[in-house]
Amino acid sequence: MRRSDENEYRDFVVARMDRLRRTAYLLCHDWHTADDLVAVTIGKLYRNWSQARGADHIDAYVRTILLRSWLDERRRPWRREHAVDEVPDRPADEGPDAAERMTLLELLANLTPRRRAAVVLRFYYDLSVDETAKTLGCSPGTVKSLTSRALEAMRTRAGTPPVFRTGEAT
Amino acid sequence: MTTNQDLVDGEMGTPPPSTVDVDAIIVRQRRAGRLRRAGLAASVGAMTLAVALVLIALRPGGPSGQVGGPPSPTPSLSPREQEAARLTATLQQLLTQALPGAEFLAPGPDDFAKTSPTEPLVFVDEGDYFLAAAQIRDADGIGAIRVTVGKEDTLLRREGDCGSDPPPQDMTIVCEVAPLADGSKLMTRNNSSKYTDYIFFGGEILRPDGNAVAVVIRNNGDPNSEVYRATPHLTLDQTVALAQSPELATTLP
């Protein structure tokens, strides 16, 4: 890559770093893993920079790399498991005040990876069903199904409907 | 108007300082690019040499019919290249025997490797270790295998144990590390997703000289794909036995 392209790449990545990290955190729920995921994403972006800068929507291009890298990472055999003395406490499933203690992030954390990815794209990025399907590499019907089941799971867990605003019926 | 993004960002709060070093990533990618180009050049060179040797052999009279003349040039391979070739032949033989009738296809990209293997079951040199991979297809579906030999930075080498599933803890992990009589450590791993049918078996042996063999086999071909097969192509015992095969060990420093 030429120096001028590299500078352009660096400027782009630095400008998007906060949004990329936040998105990665929504998926991973762990800042260290999120930073690892962002590092992998921008590494891939570097390798494909000439193609990326020619894309119609470069942010969508990067978002796709990030989402797919994360789904890859969930399936990697030797993903970065780390030894801990004790498994961290998870929110209790039952109890009269469970719903009040559930935050949006916790509700998201309890979704399966693909459902979580669909919710993040549909509601955090406000993408349409078709745009989400393109990013995840699946059909619009699958996105509708993933989103619907995700919202249902969140609803059941929280005891109340999620507070996401829906711009489009799922 | 408050958007969903504002709402979630507000709940997330201020992120901790980033550990992502963009300049270090650029340097790493530059180096990887150089390695890829060097690898390509070496492949083209080897291919040219192979074609030349075949042409010589096919000439009327062939090399055996020639009298006198200079001996054919033999490619001088480095010890690591020779080892990669030996490991490739060994792995192909072991897997062909274990999975008769299975087809080995080009593996998907390995983003954590410096050089992703592109040929099925052909070891590439990653510097500290050799890496080979393939998608495996048979009548029951597609799976995948990944084998490393040498000094890959695996969990067993780094931590000496099985570790635990990081958040969001979506895998069920059955794993144990056992010491062997010769001082080696053997990891046996059976991971399965709590939410999908995804399964992988792992076997890794870390020998006293620091060299390891790690074999992972899973029941899907491409990491982006859905699960295509009920179980991986090898059983857990077969996977561990493959990792322990003496022929797959290396003694390179």
Image: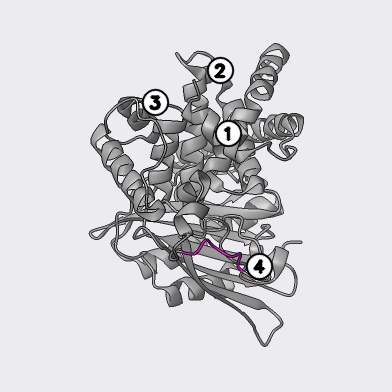
The residue under label 3 is A127
Amino acid type indicated by mark 2: Ser
Image coordinates for residue B14, horizontal then vertical, percent: 68, 36
Discs 3 and 1 share one subunit: no
Say which residue appears at 33% left-offset and 32% top-offset: A133
Discs 2 and 1 share one subunit: no
Amino acid type indicated by mark 1: Asp
For the magenta stretch, what is the residue range?
A87-92
The earlier-in-sequence mark between 1 and 4 is: 1
Label number found at residue A59: none
Q: Secondary structure at mark 2?
A: helix
* Residue placed most toward the observer, A39 or A87: A87
Q: Can the viewer see residue A41 in this picture?
A: no
The residue under label 4 is B156
Q: Secondary structure at mark 4?
A: helix
The chain that hosts pointer 1 is B
Using a 10 Å C-alpha cutoff, classify the residue at mark 1 as few (fewer than 14 neighbours), some (14 to 19) or many (20 or more).
Answer: some
Image coordinates for residue B227, horizontal then vertical, percent: 33, 54
The chain that hosts pointer 4 is B
User: Which label lies toward us, 1 or 4?
Assistant: 1
Is residue A126 rendered to the left or right of residue B123? left
The residue under label 1 is B9
Residue A4 within the segment the image draws in magenta: no
The reply to whether the C-beta atoms of the residues labelled 2 and 1 are less than 8 Å apart is no
Residue A89 within the segment the image draws in magenta: yes
The residue under label 2 is A50
Magenta-colored segment: predominant secondary structure? loop
The chain that hosts pointer 2 is A
- Count of numbered labels shown in the rendering: 4
Q: Secondary structure at mark 3?
A: loop
